[in-house]
């Protein structure tokens, strides 16, 4: 069965500092991994995905994620956080029959000025 | 371009009343369609998904049902709402083929009173 885990319920970072939101995965077969962001009372927005190729994936709003097969991780990163990055972030894995996604429990990112 | 519409944005319903939430997608054909529920502003629970007209897969047995009467229309229903049905309901779509992510609707905040 496919699953992802987000071990941190909340991440606090000061504006201008680098941020990391952690995600680990458990899949059978090739992992297809995604990050989404959700602002209050809104739907989720796609940030980036890893299907194959380079382990460092670049996405929207300056975010990037590093795929690490040996550690089964797909951590979301940004070199310099903005207050406007404060939101709820979800890691997700797409299962091998392509019809369903499984989401992590979400990590609330707080960026303080 | 493809767009997804979900309505209403907010809904307050008494216990025991019926429910109908609608989701439509424009600009694509034969999409995969999904209903998720997000409780307490956190984890996403997959409720139903559909890969074609009249084809509904239920992930969690409960008080809700889904229907897909047209290719790009997905409806979430209940005959009698329970207090526990309160939550934020999200519709999403993805192309029928390929390793794509979801595109989410803007969500419906349902409060059962």
Image (cartoon, grey):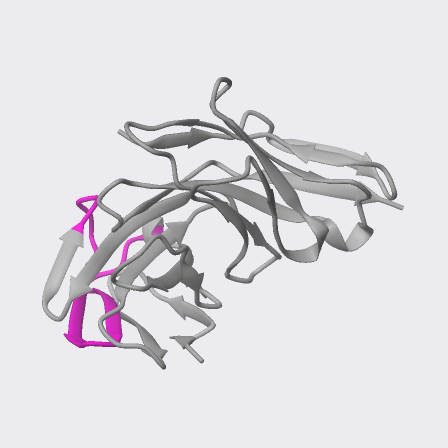
Of the pair A97 and B89, the residue shown nearer to us: A97
User: Observer-nearest residue: A28 or B51?
Assistant: A28
* Residue sitting at x 47%, y 24%: A69
Residue A60 appears left or right of B23: right
Q: Kindly tell me whether residue B109 is visible in this rendering.
A: no
Give the answer, above or below, for where A65 lies relative to B53: above
Give the answer, above or below, for where A94 lies relative to A46. Answer: above
Front residue of this view, candidates A67 and B70: A67
Is residue B93 in view from this perspective? yes
Residue stretch in magenta: B58-83
> Which residue is most to the left?
B54
Residue A30, picture quadrant: top left
In the rendered image, residue B64 lying in the magenta stretch gets the answer yes
Q: Quadrant of the N terminus of chain A?
A: top left
**Extreme residue in the front direction:** A53
Q: Residue at x 68, y 38 (%)?
A: A77
**Magenta span includes A39:** no
Query: Residue at 29% across / 40% down in the picture?
Result: A95
């Amino acid at each position: 069965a496919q699953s992802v885990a987000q071990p941190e319920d909340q991440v606090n970072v000061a504006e201008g500092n680098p941020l990391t939101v952690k995600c680990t995965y458990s899949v059978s077969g090739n992992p297809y991994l995604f990050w989404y962001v959700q602002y209050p009372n809104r739907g989720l927005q796609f940030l980036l995905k890893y299907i194959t190729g380079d382990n460092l994936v670049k996405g929207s709003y300056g975010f990037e994620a590093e795929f690490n097969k040996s550690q089964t991780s797909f951590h979301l990163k940004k070199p310099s956080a903005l207050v406007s990055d404060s939101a709820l972030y979800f890691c997700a894995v797409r299962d091998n029959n392509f019809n369903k996604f499984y989401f992590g429990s979400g990590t609330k990112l707080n960026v303080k000025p | 371009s493809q767009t997804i519409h979900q309505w209403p944005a907010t809904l307050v319903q008494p216990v025991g009343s019926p429910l109908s939430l609608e989701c439509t997608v424009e600009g694509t054909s034969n999409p995969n369609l999904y209903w998720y529920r997000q409780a307490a502003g956190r984890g996403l629970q997959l409720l139903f998904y559909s890969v074609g007209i009249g084809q509904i897969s239920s992930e969690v047995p409960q008080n809700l049902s889904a229907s897909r009467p047209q290719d790009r229309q997905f409806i979430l229903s209940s005959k009698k709402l329970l207090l526990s049905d309160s939550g934020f309901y999200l519709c999403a779509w993805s192309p029928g083929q390929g390793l794509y992510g979801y595109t989410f609707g803007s969500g419906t905040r349902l409060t059962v009173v």
